[in-house]
Amino acid sequence: MSVGTYAAREEIIRKAEKAISKADAELTAAIESGDEVKIKDAAQKAFGTHQWADQTINILKGCECGCIYCFAAARAYRFHEKEPGQWTIEILNENQFNKKVSNKACLTMFPSTHNISPNEHLPECEQKIQEILNTGSRILIVLKPWKSVVESICTKFEAYKEQIIFRFTIGSADNATLKFWEPGAPSYDERLEALRYAFEHGFSTSISCEPFLDNNIDQVIADTRAFVSDSIWVGTMNQGRARIKVNGHWTPEVEAKYNELMGWYSEENIRTLYERYKDDSLIRWKESIAKVVGVKSDCATD
Ligand code: SF4
């Protein structure tokens, strides 16, 4: 499939993201079953490099953002790849870093199980971005963005901007809410500034409001839409309770916040949200919402 058109690119992204969601749901079900063979099979599908129509690449183990609902952290703890409480310590995965990038993909997602922070691993991440771009693949760079990181990527890869799509995750416009769920991630203002920088420098930009973390995602949509050239994806938190527990964050305070969030995810609220934006060409619905309102999902990432 040619990736030259918007529709072709969207289709590639949709298929890749649907594959991620399916594999992740299978892994969660396998973990809940406790069957080690099923867990290993599902994990290979969910985290192997050949799981998608295209490919996903990660070079770090751990993520400074420390989102308490993180699926990658839950997986790492489950498979003893990280000691309890160590997820926020980022370690270079030498094998993945040194692995040659396939030249067969037309769209590569990087990263998907870590962020890119301005700290020690930015050079390695940029090296991997360069390697991906050198293959001719488009790259979907998914971040909770630090402005300095986005500035650096935009500057270094200015000549490759047609190959690059940014997707910035912003689940709330409220800094206290972001801090609660994503304690090491950039603030709301930082993410907005990063978005604005990429947009104003001519890069393709999109937003992921998944998971949205409060009952005012309208604010994020309103604040970001002027700087989004591509799309804004909206979805709920998946398997949050199980993941938060595995990640060691399940306290009475978190339980209360989680229950509050689940209240905001009520069918009535989801339907109202959908009605508000269903004719908005910028908004795309993740499977978590599409299945509630009974429409075909635009996309289905975790
Ligand atoms: S940014 Fe992504 S990978 Fe990092 S902790 Fe948050 S959810 Fe996990």
Image (cartoon, helix red, strand yellow):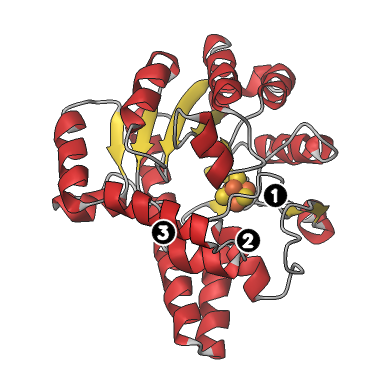
Amino acid of disc 1: Cys
Q: Position of residue 118 (x, y in %)?
A: 77, 31
- Horizontal side of 288 relative to 250 (left or right) equals left
Amino acid of disc 3: Ser
Q: Which residue is mark 2?
A: 73
Q: Which numbered marker is on residue 63?
A: 1
Q: Position of residue 135 (x, y in %)?
A: 66, 40
User: Mark 2 CB in 8 Å range of ligand 1?
Assistant: yes
Q: Which residue appears at 21% of the width and 37% of the height?
A: 273
Q: Which numbered marker is on residue 21?
A: 3
Answer with the quarter of the image where residue 7 lies. Answer: top left
Q: Classify mark 1: residues with Cα within 10 Å, few (<14), some (14-19) or many (20+).
A: many
Q: Which residue appears at 50% of the width and 61% of the height?
A: 252
Of the image marks 3 and 2, the number of the one nearer the N terminus:
3
Q: CA distance from mark 1 to mark 3?
A: 20 Å
Q: CA distance from mark 1 to mark 2?
A: 8 Å
- Horizontal side of 187 relative to 52 (left or right) equals right
Q: Tag 1, which secondary structure?
A: loop
Of the image marks 1 and 3, the number of the one nearer the N terminus:
3
